[in-house]
Image: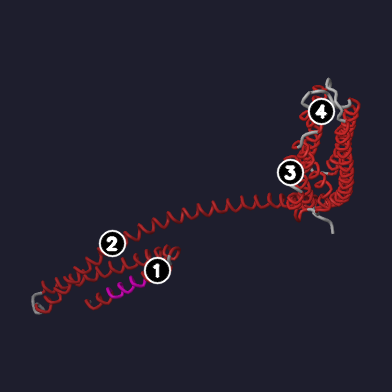
Amino acid sequence: MEESPTAERNFYNQETKLASELFSTSLSGKGTFNELSATLGAKSTVDEKKPFLQEHSALSKRSDDFVGQSTPMDRSFENNEDGEPDFDVSRVEVAEELQKQQNERLERLWKHQSEQNQKIFEKLDASMTRENRNACLREQHARQVEDLRRYYENEITGLKKQLADMKNIIFQHNQQESSVKGEIQKEFENLSQANLELSSKCDTLENAKQLMQNQLTQTNIRRQELESQCQQLVATNQIIDTRSKELKKRKVETAAKVKEIDRQREQLQAQCDLVGKEKLILKRSKDELERKYNQLQDDYQKLSDKCHKLKEESKICRDRTKVQETLVEKTNKNIRELELVIETLKRELEDKKILYEYDSLSEKHEKAKGHVQRLEGKLAEREGEGQNLL
């Protein structure tokens, strides 16, 4: 099953982070093999980093011992109170030559390692297909190369400093002659031991180079997998482009439909405004009709009272003169006229009621219907009272 680009990127970031932690710990001069192994933990196996960690531990220990202890030549000068020279110049030259050879070997090793690392980083840069991934990897590679360069420069500087110290001692004591052949022999043995340690260091670096080459092979395999995944992503991208074009076309059609709906909504809004104006006019007419109806009710009540009085008077004055009968007839005539007026007003009220029902049905049909029924009941009562009066 092929790994995703995210998994590949996470793996590579993890490896570069481990290398940065390892070299930063090496440059600080602190931490032992156990501490470095604990730092790596489950991120990487100890067997892959063990040669480099052993080398770092041995070099740190040897550097501390070299700085902390006094050289045989220093002890010879401390014990020699007369200040006479007591060493052989030829052996010093041999020691100096050995130091030069070791220095040159370290420089060649550093140059070779730098070239190998540069090739590896160039191949890794060439394998990346995206610009942001290339920038990230170049930055990580630059940091790793800078850490390696700083580490080896510190090693070379330390050795050069030791060589400079030895040259200063030779320059200060080249006029003194003394026999310190035994101590020079010991110093030569120490240098031989240092040479052996440097040889072991070179072997360790060779192993590290082989390990990095193996990692490069794995990286190439993963690069091929990433290329196949990129092809799949390109095909997917084409499908997505086709789909996006279809969606854009649908978007244009939807926008046209939305404009048509907005136009219809504006028309409906204009119609609603007209209906609102008509409702306002009907409401005013209804208020005017109610006012007239109340006035008619008052007039009708007055007429009803007057009619009642006239009926009483007619009962009392039934046997009176014709003038009184004429007045009664006129009164009846007025009552009939009032009834005709009431019927006319009732018809007008029914017409207004139809308009009012139309308005009420558009807003609150049920409420308006109940109100109309109450009005009809009141009119029926008034008609019954009028009939009773007649």
Q: Nearer the viewer, residue 288 or 49?
A: 49
Q: Quadrant of the N terminus?
A: bottom right
Tags 3 and 2 touching, CB below 8 Å:
no
Q: Amino acid at mark 3?
A: Thr
| Numbered disc in front, either 1 or 3 | 3
* 220 drawn magenta: no
Q: Which residue is mark 1?
A: 367
Q: Position of residue 289 (x, y in %)?
A: 32, 61
Q: Amino acid at mark 1?
A: Lys
Magenta-colored span = 372-382
Q: Amino acid at mark 2?
A: Lys
Alpha carbons under labels 4 and 2: distance apart? 131 Å
* 379 drawn magenta: yes
- The numbered dot on residue 292 is 2
| 197 shown above or below 325 | above
Q: Nearer the viewer, residue 371 or 255?
A: 255
Crowd band around label 1 with a 10 angstrom C-alpha radius: few (<14), some (14–19), many (20+): few
